Image (spheres, rainbow, N blue to C red):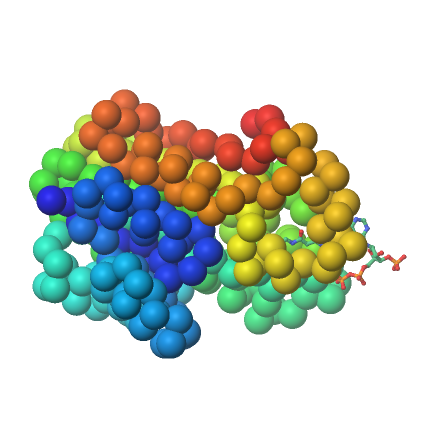
Amino acid sequence: MRTALVTGGTTGIGAAICAALQAADLRVAATYSGHEARAASFTEATGIPTFRWDVSDHAACAAGVAQVETALGPIDILINNAGITRDSSLLKMSEEAWKRVLGVDLDSCFNMAQAVVGGMRARRWGRIVSIASINGQTGQFGQTNYAAAKAGMLGFTKALALEVARDGVTVNAVAPGYTDTEMVAAVAPEIMKTIVARIPVGRLARPEEIARCVAFLVADEAGFITGSTLSVNGGQAMI
Ligand code: CAA
């Protein structure tokens, strides 16, 4: 049985990914950063163990991965899902808001991949899927930090895919559109109205619809798909 680790896996898209991977007969673990009670009820409901560390911290990722591997065995599948927003227009954006979003959303991909990719190469099989965003592909008013981080994830994915292609390790990204999660619920309702009006399908994505794409990409049968970005946005941006 293969083992998958989902960062930020106790809520939103991450929780749906955990459920989809568990349904695909994988051993699944999730990381979380702060919400102890939410992590505890997630484990109670799903049986999926959770581990707490800050994915923007390189040393914490190395130590955390070692802890997961001691508990569950080698990590065959990494899902870089943890992400945050700190929206504001550029002139109002604090340096902290820039650095925190780049740290959690983009540095985490480097930190986590570096901790697991050596083992995947040695075992000659691995899957890394990073959850990017439509807003990294198109830009979004008030999101210079988030758009930069998410666009960075796409370049990271392609470069790493080249480095490990011969070792049975694939590296891909999924770029969701606006999805029915707490993150999107935090956007002002009048702004959300204008955003939903631009989605041809006429609604937000459900987290399960994003998770399905991740399950597809981590399957054995997806071994020829690498360095790609799967856009899942209801037709909002056909890229
Ligand atoms: N387009 C054009 N103009 C806009 C605008 C927009 N989207 N948003 C605000 N403005 C205008 C304002 O009306 C204001 O104009 P006036 O000065 O003439 O009144 C000017 O721009 C400056 O606006 P603010 O001072 O209000 O700017 P702000 O720094 O407070 O931030 C904002 C505005 C809260 C970031 C707002 O633009 C916003 O909510 N944008 C959407 C952000 C968004 O979509 N976030 C997605 C979060 S979920 C997610 O990211 C998940 C995913 O992957 C899809």
In percent of width and height, residue 35 lies at 41, 74
Residue at image location 57% in from the left, 27% down from the top: 239
Instruction: Name the quadrant containing residue 88.
Output: bottom right
Residue at image location 77% in from the left, 45% down from the top: 194
Whether residue 151 is visible here, answered yes or no, is: no
Counting the numbered discs, the total is 0
Left or right: residue 113 versus residue 33 is left
Residue at image location 65% in from the left, 70% down from the top: 94
Left or right: residue 22 versus residue 107 is left
Q: Is residue 196 above or below residue 8?
A: above
In percent of width and height, residue 34 lies at 40, 74
Q: Is residue 190 above or below residue 239?
A: below
In percent of width and height, residue 186 lies at 63, 62
Front position in the image: 180 or 68: 180
- Residue that sits furthest to the top in the current view: 224
In percent of width and height, residue 117 lies at 22, 47
Residue at image location 11% in from the left, 44% down from the top: 1
Whether residue 229 is visible here, answered yes or no, is: yes
- Residue that sits furthest to the front in the current view: 45
Left or right: residue 191 versus residue 27 is right
Q: Is residue 182 above or below residue 150?
A: below
Front position in the image: 99 or 213: 213
Tell which quarter ligand 1 is in.
bottom right
